Image (cartoon, grey):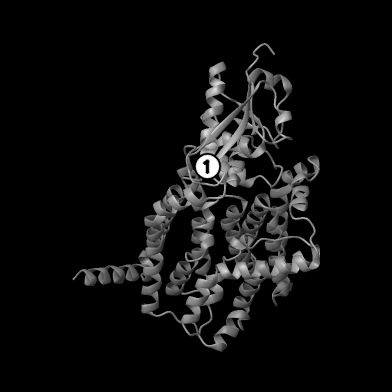
């Protein structure tokens, strides 16, 4: 009897997603549940380790809006600032923001796939993407890579529609999306190069180039990024210098091996969807049609899909740069269309039922396992500082408010420690390292708290005031869970 009821429930679900009148509402509701479940998973599973350093760094940047920052363009920090102007500054709301990136990307994929897939294949393809770790586990670390997921998706959507229709509206939207991609991370040059090559490789290129569409797209892109370009020149291309230093030149053998690892990792993350489609037994002709479609429209889609995955290894080998497979997380927008659009690939009612059951159950299985994941992380985690960021912030605030009732406005010295204190301290102070510096008079009036690792011989000499060594242990079983910090407080001097 219970099995019959469960079977009936799944049949009703399959019926709802197959019914055009209800499909849109059901998909939006499913994505909302997906968002909530994975944000809850992140909040619980990652609680012992607290926020990743990438997340506290973006929060610290968001305290001072700018046209660029020391490592990246500004859009990620802008989004954080906007988000926390509405939501409380807590870990759960940050994980909600993190998961809103892949969920928004999934919704854009849903809209885009309507141009190429029938209703059942659209649902099947959307479900396939939720089995890629980029869209759940890995997306919980909010950074500029996760910000690119919806941006690359929407840029791809509007480019394909602009190319097909050559209308000025889609062209302008494509330019707006392309500019937003560049304002998030310069890695987006990979996507823009891929779109340009795809446009020139298509047989409709002459008609496209004679239309206003590509020029509108290019003009809007330049308008969007112009203020940031001016900032880059004024600040001596600091993010580019950081990227060149971080991913410095490597010998040919090392970059070739890195390129192979990149490709293996990128396709490895998408392995489950590919295996599921292979299990549909489409046959070798369909595989060839999948890799290089016979139809012009699908072939353009295939080129737009493959190039952002294949260009980076080539560029890495030529330039000697190091690349990471995680950077491919924004490049899977068209995966469902590429896998499912060949006519020989068919999805049966049984296939649909199986994929819906698997993808509906997975978030709740993960959520049920989250407490055990948290226990494991507390015993075997590898990042001792993030586990102590809230305790360190409390220690600094206690010492600050022992000498002044005024809010703590500035924290300085070590960049990673300052960023963590900026998020976890009740006053959310401005983190000075790597940021534009207030003038000396303002710092004197406001006061500053400084923090370094006690053993850091480069950081501690930069501190001012009376330095106190504080020992913090978070009580976990993590290796090196007890750390020693140097803290000093320079109280406000109102007469300055």
Q: Is residue 37 or residue 177 the one in the foreground? A: 37
How dense is the environment of label 1, judged by Cα within 10 Å: few (below 14), some, or many (20 and up)? many
* SS state under label 1: helix
The foreground one among 158 and 122 is 122
**In the displayed image of the protein, which residue is found farthest to the left?**
1
Q: Residue 141: in sight, yes or no? A: yes
x 30%, y 72%: residue: 11
Q: How far across and how far down the image is residue 125, in percent?
A: 48, 70
Q: Where is residue 142 in the image (x, y as percent from the top left)?
A: 56, 50
Q: In which quarter of the image is residue 438?
A: top right
Q: Residue 334: tell me if it is visible.
A: no
The C terminus is located in which quarter? Answer: top right
The correct choice, above or below, for 242 with respect to 365 in the image is above
Residue 194 position within the rendered picture, expressed as x and y whole percent measured from the top left:
70, 67
Say whether residue 311 is left or right of residue 477. right
Q: Residue at x 50, y 80 (%)?
A: 278
Q: In this view, does 253 lie to the left or right of 153?
A: right
């Amino acid at each position: 009897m219970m099995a019959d009821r469960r079977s009936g429930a799944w049949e009703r679900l399959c019926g709802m997603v197959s019914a055009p009148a209800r499909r849109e509402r059901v998909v939006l509701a499913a994505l909302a549940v997906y968002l909530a479940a994975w944000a809850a998973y992140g909040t619980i599973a990652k609680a012992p380790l607290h926020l990743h350093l990438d997340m506290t760094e973006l929060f610290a940047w968001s305290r001072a809006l700018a046209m660029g920052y020391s490592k990246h363009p500004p859009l990620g920090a802008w989004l954080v600032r906007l988000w926390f102007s509405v939501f409380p500054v807590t870990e759960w709301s940050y994980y909600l923001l993190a998961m809103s990136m892949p969920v928004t990307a999934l919704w854009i994929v849903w809209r885009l796939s309507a141009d190429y897939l029938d209703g059942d294949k659209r649902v099947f393809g959307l479900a396939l993407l939720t089995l890629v770790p980029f869209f759940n586990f890995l997306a919980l670390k909010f950074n500029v890579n996760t910000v690119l997921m919806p941006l690359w998706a929407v840029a791809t959507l509007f480019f394909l529609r602009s190319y097909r229709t050559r209308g000025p509206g889609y062209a302008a939207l494509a330019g707006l999306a392309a500019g937003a991609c560049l304002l998030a991370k310069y890695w987006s040059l990979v996507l823009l190069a891929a779109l340009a090559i795809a446009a020139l490789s298509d047989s409709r290129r002459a008609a496209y180039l004679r239309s206003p569409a590509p020029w509108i797209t290019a003009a809007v892109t330049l308008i969007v990024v112009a203020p940031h370009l001016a900032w880059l020149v004024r600040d001596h291309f600091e993010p580019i210098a950081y990227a060149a230093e971080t991913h410095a030149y490597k010998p040919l053998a090392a970059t070739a091996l890195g390129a192979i690892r990149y490709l293996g990792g990128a396709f490895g993350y998408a392995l489950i969807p590919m295996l599921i489609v292979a299990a549909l037994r489409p046959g070798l002709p369909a595989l060839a049609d999948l890799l290089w479609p016979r139809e012009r429209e699908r072939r353009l889609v295939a080129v737009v899909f493959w190039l952002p995955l294949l260009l980076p290894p080539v560029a890495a080998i030529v330039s000697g740069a190091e690349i990471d497979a995680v950077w491919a997380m924004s490049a899977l927008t068209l995966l469902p269309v590429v896998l499912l659009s060949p006519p020989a690939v068919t999805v049966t009612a049984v296939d649909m039922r199986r994929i819906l059951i698997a993808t509906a159950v997975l978030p709740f299985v993960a959520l049920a396992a989250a407490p055990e994941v948290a226990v494991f992380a507390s015993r075997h985690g590898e990042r001792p500082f993030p586990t102590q960021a809230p305790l360190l912030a409390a220690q600094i605030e206690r010492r600050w408010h022992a000498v002044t009732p005024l809010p703590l406005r500035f924290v300085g010295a070590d960049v990673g420690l300052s960023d963590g204190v900026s998020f976890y301290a009740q006053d959310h102070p401005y983190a000075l390292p790597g940021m534009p510096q207030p003038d000396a008079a303002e710092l004197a009036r406001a006061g500053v708290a400084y923090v370094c690792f006690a053993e850091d011989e480069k950081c501690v000499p930069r501190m001012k005031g009376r330095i106190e060594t504080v020992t913090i242990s978070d009580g976990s079983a993590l290796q090196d869970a007890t750390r020693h910090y140097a803290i000093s407080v320079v109280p406000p001097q109102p007469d300055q």
